[in-house]
Amino acid sequence: MSSSTAPSKTPTSSAAPSPQPKKLKQNLDFSTLCIRQDLLDTIAKMGYEKPTPIQAAMIPLAIKRMDLVGQARTGTGKTAAFALPILQNIDFEKTILPQALVLVPTRELAVQVAGEFEKIAVSSTARIVLLYGGKPMRPQLNQLQRGASVIVGTPGRVLDHLQRRSFDPSGLRCVVLDEADRMLDIGFRPDIERILRQCPPRRQTLMLSATLPGPIKEIAKRYMYKPKLVNFSGTDISADTIDQYYLRVNSDMKFEVLMKLLEREQPTQAIIFCRTRLRTEWLYRKLLKAGVLQGVGTIHGDLSQSSRDQMMGGFRNGTINYLVATDVVGRGIDVSNISHIINFDIPEMSDDYVHRVGRT
Ligand code: AMP
């Protein structure tokens, strides 16, 4: 289990952060990154004072339309690192077709990424269209017909639209694969490759990924042009600001220990990760039944889209304090009040651990 103050501290939290990002953070300013004045004004209004390291490194190169592989977690400001260059490079004179396509692994992340685009595009006429599964096609088709400059979506639904020819990919100048490692883990690789094959060959491709396993490198090699690696993860990609702890517990005692831990820690907001959908639902019901905690929610792939939206909405606005989740939906969640991540079940893959604890 990982949390901010708890019993036994692990020896795993000792890795030193890479020194490069700190230097960039101190010396750089958004105005040095070749960003247009209207966008500079918008981000200033959003309260972004200094670029994060990944933004400082990626934005000038992405504006020059280079292909980039950015190794970065959620919470590092990676969305603005690709949204700003994309919005800057949209050419309203040349085409009315969609000019950028951003693929993300989950519906929740799609909503979050599109939201960031909307905020940054507030002073422009760029239209952002969100395409994800579990929602009827018609409203999405209507939106596409009204015109889209940037499409943000999950691979399955985007491919579905491409197959129905509901949008023309020939005007795409930039494709982003966000949380690429996660998309591959979920099994989106064939869909992603089909989509990429339908995009114009002369385009920019940006790939964001917390980890760079073999299949990610293969995709980069096959579908990107001389990609430059922008790495801000260091060797240990768990943030150095996170305290990590573990407890040795017999499995039949886990629930009791969890209750004690929550009582003692009093998290502002916590995500409690379980390994499977069934187990997530089981723990959620058990917590509800215990009736001690205020604001318990759950999110996993067996829930309907509207329940998932409702749960995420509740977690964002603070009516839900304890979110029991599977890894699929756990990744990419960016809620600023999360104080504790609890690994009720140990993740199957070590990368998942990094993604889970990166939510805090
Ligand atoms: P992301 O990693 O893109 O999910 O961003 C994490 C959070 O940081 C989001 O809430 C962003 O709105 C915020 N953010 C991104 N860039 C900056 C910045 N330069 N300064 C302050 N906040 C930022």
Image (spheres, rainbow, N blue to C red):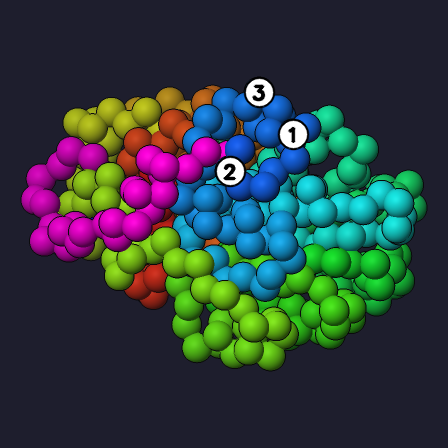
Residue highlighted by disc 3: 45
Residue highlighted by disc 2: 32
Q: Amino acid at mark 3?
A: Lys
Percent from the top left, x then y, of residue 340? 29, 36
Task: Using the image, determine if residue 180 lies above or below residue 282.
Answer: below
Q: Secondary structure at mark 3?
A: helix
The answer to whether one can see residue 279 in this image is no
Camera-side residue of 32 and 75: 32
Q: Residue at x 48, y 44 (%)?
A: 55
Q: Quadrant of residue 50?
A: top left
Left or right position of 215 against 125? left
Crowd band around label 3 with a 10 angstrom C-alpha radius: few (<14), some (14–19), many (20+):
few
Tell me whether circle 2 and circle 3 mark residues in contact (CB < 8 Å).
Answer: no
Left or right position of 40 against 202? left
Q: Residue at x 89, y 51 (%)?
A: 95
Percent from the top left, x then y, of residue 154? 65, 55
Label 1 vs label 3, nearer the camera: 1
Q: Earlier in the sequence, mark 1 or mark 3?
A: 1
Q: Quadrant of residue 168?
A: bottom right
Q: Residue at x 24, y 41 (%)?
A: 242
Q: Which residues are magenta?
A: 2-30
The answer to whether the beta carbon of the residue marked 1 is less than 8 Å from any atom of ligand 1 is: no
Q: Residue at x 78, y 58 (%)?
A: 172
Q: Earlier in the sequence, mark 2 or mark 3?
A: 2
Which numbered marker is on residue 37?
Answer: 1
